[in-house]
Amino acid sequence: MVIIPIILCSCISKDLFLPYNGVIYDGGYFKVMVQQIEIAMVVFCRRFYCGIGRYTILKLDRSKDGRLQYKMTNSRSTAKIGLLFSETGATSIVENSQRKGALLAINQINESGGVLGRQLEVLSCDSASDATAFFENANYLLDMECVALFGCYMSSSRKAVLPVVEKRNSLLFYPTLYEGFEFSRNCIYTGASPNQSASVLANFLTRNFKSNYVFVGSDYVFPYEINRIMLDLLTSQGAIVKEEIYIPLNATDDEIIRVVKKVKQLGEVIVFSSVVGDAAITFAREYHAAGFNQELTPVVSLTFSEIDAKETGGKVSNGYIRVAPYFSETANVANKKFVDEFKIQYGPDEAISAETEAAYSQMWIFAEAVERAGSFDFKNIINSISTFTIEAPQGPIQVEKNSQHTYIWPKIAICNEHGKFEIVEESKLRIKPDPYMINYDSAKDVLTDMYSVRGVV
Amino acid sequence: MARSLRFKDVRDIKITLVHPHDHDGIEIVNQIERIGCQVQHLWQANQVINVETEVLIAGIFKENINSIKSQIKNSGNDMTTIAVLDYESPTTLEMAIDLNAVAIISKPVRSFGIFANLVIARWNWNREQKLKKRIHRLERLVSSKTLVNKAVLIIMNTQRLSEDDAYKLIRTQAMSKRTSIKNIAEAIINTEDLLTPK
């Protein structure tokens, strides 16, 4: 009997009476054990403390239409949103920015009246770029009755979360470019697939550069796969790829310096980099220090963004070429509004990248899908999610019904000395996602027609 | 084709699993033990695959692919390989193909599918072995056929015999010398130069 008041206090403070429009819980990898105990207490308390009120309503709702309606918890008019971004760890720079994008969208959605009349409440877990923590935090967030999960950057974290959402009939919104060859009914992919990124880059490179290449990537599945695709695309156009080098995710500076030396030994080469996280920034600095011709043999990438450029400074990343569906220099009304509000929220110097934009836009996709479905139930959301277009900062985007990947607008940009990516070409049409595309060497002609040159390289 | 794998034989299959001792690895081991097979679970590169292993279940990771290859090579066994994959991307599949995998177990591992994969993989492997043997036998037959034909021609020319009689002569020789027709044919071809009048 002594324990019950303590449990009640814990339950009340954590779960019921905190302000709903802010971040109410920040869990970390090391807090997982504490979280598990809290879940147990909260679940126990719901049964005990809220037994009569909430439990009865839940039962009524179930008997009415046969499925669990989140609206049953009408003692709280919020819907919980689970965020899975690493706030610490190797890839935290990008993921923190994605998190900011998601939070901005949530604030805007709440200001405009919420979703189905309910305010969105944020539960955010720091998984520290560790796949096991992602798995545990995903479970935790769903235990806390989150209606959907948003986040993941590296493929390993997505792979860890997918079985959780699949098992528990929930949804993961994944806002990152990845290697393709995947589909889960419980995942909405809002980043680019390789056909929307790698083939665009290779096409641009073969038109503008005659050179040898070296591939440098982080040691995990995305770089392996994207390198295979780029190798096919570039060598089919007569380019020579001299070497593929992989850097561990938590590489030390010495390891990176050794890789830079190796690259320099190859002579005049264009570096295709899929190094991610902190290593990308160290690599950029060291490669700059070693010296290279940024115009003739630039560093090209699908991942090195405004956020990385801000970390390295414009001098280091000047001349870097990236293909992405969004750059903060994108000129349209939706983007101006997005950038303005982002800077009001987070400060004028805050960098915004394609990853940030996808995390922002996918929250709006989710909100619209729920409104149209009239329910937070995952099956209803899936049914409505491909039925509309939203005006995203990158352009009007839509989820493709069959693959649950997104139609996006690839753009090519070159980083200037101020760390800003100036768009030189952009797609005339939104490009359909094709996550299982294999025959890349035959995709060349289609893409050439789709691009309008806006600047001279 | 006649039944090449009897289900009651499945339990006799000796299995080695090369996979980290994580949730998926343990689930595979548990399921194999439920099925009733013997399983050796190893992960470190310096561990040795049992000599009796018939089926190798290998987790495919870029960092261990070379050590698995050398483990297979060192074991010297002719094993049926099943790959355990967490990605369906072509680079991962290439690694599986590299190991000559004949079946796939996908992650997260479910108990369903391991028995089916084991049976199908073993059956396919048995069939492949039978076909290989058959091809080998046919290749031998074809090569001896050419030799015999050549020898028959030589006998026909030197002894002025018909084709049938020439062949019968060679066969009789083979039977009396207790050797194969192919060997006699080879002897005839090799000694042709000596025997033909210049």
Image: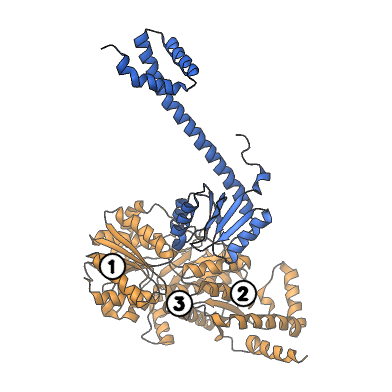
Provide residue A240's location: percent of width, then percent of height: 27, 57
Which chain is depicted blue? B
Q: Quadrant of residue A336?
A: bottom left
The reply to whether dot 2 and dot 1 touch (C-beta < 8 Å) is no
Q: Which residue is mark 1?
A: A262
Chain identifier of the residue bearing label 2 in the image: A
What colour has chain A?
orange
Provide residue B169's location: percent of width, then percent of height: 44, 12
Q: Is A102 in front, or is A241?
A: A241
**Extreme front residue here?**
B177
Give the distance between the C-alpha atoms of the residues marked 3 and 2, in whole angstroms: 20 Å
Q: Which mark is residue B2?
A: none
Q: Which residue is mark 2?
A: A142
Q: Look at discs 2 and 1 and give the one toward the viewer.
A: 1
Q: Residue at x 47, y 61 (%)?
A: B61
Q: Which residue is mark 3?
A: A95
Q: Is A156 in front, or is A355?
A: A156
Under mark 3, the amino acid is Glu
Q: Is A170 in front, or is A340?
A: A170
SS at mark 3 in the image: helix
Q: Residue at x 45, y 69 (%)?
A: A176
SS at mark 1 in the image: helix
Look at the image and tell me whether residue A180 can be seen.
Answer: no
Provide residue A247's location: percent of width, then percent of height: 38, 69
A179 vs A183, left or right, is left
Look at the image and tell me whether residue A428 can be seen.
Answer: yes
The reply to whether dot 3 and dot 2 touch (C-beta < 8 Å) is no
Q: Is B190 in front, or is A240?
A: B190
